[in-house]
Amino acid sequence: MKRYGLFIGGEWLEASSGTTFDVLNPADRTVVGQAAAGNAADVNKAVDAAARAFPDWSKRTARERSGLLAKIYDGMMKRKEEIARLMTLEQGKPLGEARGEVQYAADFFQWYGEEAKRIYGETIPANSPDKRIWVLRQPVGVTAAITPWNFPAAMITRKVAPALAAGCTMVAKPAEQTPLTAALLAEIMQEAGLPPGVFNLVTGTQAEEIGDALLADSRVRKLTFTGSTEVGKTLMRKAADTVKRLSLELGGQAPYLVFADADLEQAAIEVTASKFRNAGQTCVCTNRVYVHHSIKEEFAAILARYAQELKVGNGLHEGVQIGPLIDEQALDKVESHVRDAVDQGARVLTGGRKLRPSEQETGCFYEPTVLLDTTEKMRVEQEETFGPVLPIHAFETEEEALALANNTPYGLAAYLYTRDLSRAVRVSERLEYGIVGVNDGMPSTAQAPFGGMKQSGLGREGGRQGIDEYLEVKYVSVGLK
Ligand code: NAP
């Protein structure tokens, strides 16, 4: 059993309340560890530590910061299996997926370790011969990160790595369900020799109190948040009081457009990977499939066959491909979406029920489900289901498919499958989404700028662009007289 305190100023501390909370395995509801229950007083201590650490950290050379990030990458690689197992224990995803996430998460340290060396400025020709204009890019300062449970490692490293590379310090608050992976990452950063206070972790169950303390503190110059659109909007309102910089990675509602010329088996492999990964609990998961009417029945049958073959159970068990949903609330949402679709005439091709894989597996399991003939009126097409449910809706024309795909307040990821190059270009340019996968259901990678349009968020994480979120632009106008 893991037991972690708060990581503040390079030390592991008890919470000021003196209390801890249990972390449960969503597969069987056993206690897998305990984390310290931090509160506003702990946030204050963590911001003190981050503010104290900032002047020295921001003055280190890019080469030094880069070297430390590389050490953190190596530390994660050495403890890859341990991180992956802990993640499966507290989050439920299959071990193979957890290993994949550790690699993805570590890649941000490697990528931004390199980017730290490329924080270039500019010179601009001035209007007078005795003036010079220089543009500098400088670290924002103390930053705060609030992260969700669905990617317990990657959602933290995608923020920490560019922040540290830029010369910022950080206070992070992970989700209540997954504090242990976050604490293990802090331990790895400590072992790599990260100076005290550069990264601080406040775990806890009082999200609003912790969030409010971070937002009210004017020393915190930026908030980077990943989570639901609803909470993101609340944080955005509260951030207005101190005019904090914001990055918001919010909910998605991804469409997958499958055109008549698609290689159906390959398209089904991509859709299945995109939909059922992490039991459908990813922000870029396919939420609805739009398929050309001429191939609807054939394609739906292939998808139903793939879905039936997926093995559901405890993520630590051999061969399991779908773990439990995170909690009862998530299960209720999935059940209500399916009920609503069926009540309005959708056909269940496979799945559609909750599941108890064995006597011990008492968590919230749900059968991989494929629904045919869903419509725009159904909740499965309107809201993020965040579960293993795949609605299929037929279209007649490219124009109609695009209108259906774009008819949502969200704009994170969209996908299309076609072998027609002109169509691929045309459609991908008209999709109002920050990420478009063309014949690719798994586009996320450290070197690409991940992020959403519309109510899916602000800013980008990953890629060359991701570091800009942690840099201020300053120009210096120099008179030579
Ligand atoms: P959530 O309920 O919004 O929670 C996210 C984080 O915010 C958690 O740490 C939570 O703490 C905290 N929080 C909740 N209420 C708060 C408040 N009033 N003030 C401050 N912090 C608060 O989202 P979730 O259920 O964990 O995650 C699922 C959502 O995240 C989905 O909508 C998904 O699409 C989205 N997501 C987006 C991306 C992306 O890159 N765009 C990536 C992954 C997930 P507690 O856990 O302690 O409540």
Image (tube, rainbow, N blue to C red):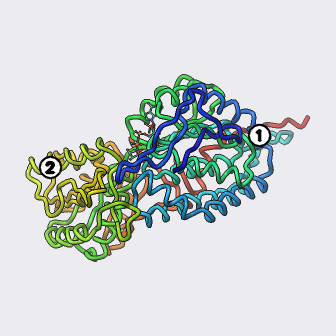
- Image point (52%, 54%), residue name: 154
Q: Picture quarter containing residue 8?
A: top right
Look at the image and tell me whether residue 134 can be seen.
yes
User: What residue did someone put label 2 on?
Assistant: 341
Look at the image and tell me whether residue 406 can be seen.
no
Q: Earlier in the sequence, mark 1 or mark 2?
A: 1
Out of 411 and 78, give the one closest to the viewer: 78
Q: Amino acid at mark 2?
A: Ala
Q: Residues within 10 Å of mark 2 (few under 14, many from 20)?
A: many
Q: Residues within 10 Å of mark 1 (few under 14, many from 20)?
A: few
Tell whether circle 2 marks a residue whose Cβ is less than 8 angstroms from ligand 1.
no
User: What residue did someone put label 1 on?
Assistant: 127
Picture quarter with the C terminus: top right
Picture layout, residue 83 above or below residue 266: above
Q: Picture quarter containing residue 254?
A: bottom left
- Image point (54%, 49%), residue name: 2
> Left or right: where does residue 276 sit relative to residue 159?
left
Q: Secondary structure at mark 1?
A: loop
Figure quadrant, ligand 1: top left
Whole-percent x and y of residue 275? Answer: 31, 60
